[in-house]
Amino acid sequence: MYLISIYFDDTTNKKIQRYIDIVAERTGNRFMTDGKVPPHMTISAFETRDEKKVQELLRGKFADLPQGEITWCSIGTFLPYVIYLSPVLNEYLSKLSKEIYDTLSGMDSVEISKFYQPFQWFPHATIGKKLTKEEMKIAFDVLQDNYGMFGSKVTHIGLAKPNPHRDLICMELKNEKQGGK
């Protein structure tokens, strides 16, 4: 399995990491912290038989993508064991997801997860994973007491292998307000 994820500005990273850390501390479930999973949002998950070709294609695509703004608005769960933060699915996220899907779907050697296809993707940043029923209750209480809506900037995009998390590519997105980078 390969994941394409977006990453955020330093302020957002610190805020999301604080949520991950406090949930791990209060629940005792350290899946996210022990796995050193960075704050991120996965926008595609896929299998391939040709990692090298996919990496070449994605390096070119990633170089053309812009930074963007998102607003984190909600806490949610994928029952029975995941708690996450969810942003507003705005035009920036929709376009980014579609561009990545269109890029990957043109390759014969790629099979995209059904959960990351157009109108199937649910944007989120995981805060706790593999939580028990009791840990989920604690995590929700912790976030309810500590969470508030906030805005953030998407600054980087990457290709990674999960379990444990291992970056294969991580690139800064173009900052169009400063003429690109």
Image (tube, rainbow, N blue to C red):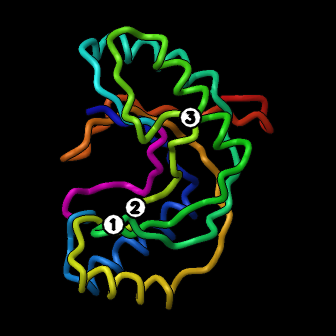
> What distance separates the C-alpha of mark 1 from that of mark 3?
22 Å
Closer to us: 137 or 22: 137
Instruction: Give, as a three-letter code, the residue at label 3.
Output: Pro
Front label number (1 vs 3): 3
Closer to us: 158 or 11: 158
Q: Is residue 77 magenta?
A: no
Answer few, some or many: residues within 10 Å of disc 1's Cα (few below 14, many 20 plus, some between 14 and 19). Answer: some
Q: Is residue 37 magenta?
A: yes
Q: Position of residue 105 (x, y in %)?
A: 47, 18
User: Label 2: which residue?
Assistant: 126
Whether 87 is drawn above or below 109: the answer is: below
* Among numbered discs 3 and 2, the one appearing first in the sequence: 3
Q: Quadrant of the C terminus?
A: top right
Q: Which residues are magenta?
A: 34-43
**Labels 2 and 1 touching (C-beta < 8 A):** yes
User: Label 1: which residue?
Assistant: 82
Instruction: Give, as a three-letter code, the residue at label 1.
Output: Val
Q: Disc 1 on helix, strand or loop?
A: strand
9 lies left or right of 143: right
Q: Disc 2 on helix, strand or loop?
A: strand
Q: Residue at x 58, y 71 (%)?
A: 74
User: Label 3: which residue?
Assistant: 118
**Labels 3 and 2 touching (C-beta < 8 A):** no
Closer to us: 167 or 131: 131
Q: Residue at x 68, y 63 (%)?
A: 151
Q: Position of residue 87 (x, y in %)?
A: 60, 60
Q: Position of residue 55 (x, y in %)?
A: 38, 18
* Among numbered discs 1 and 3, the one appearing first in the sequence: 1
Whether 44 is drawn above or below 59: the answer is: below
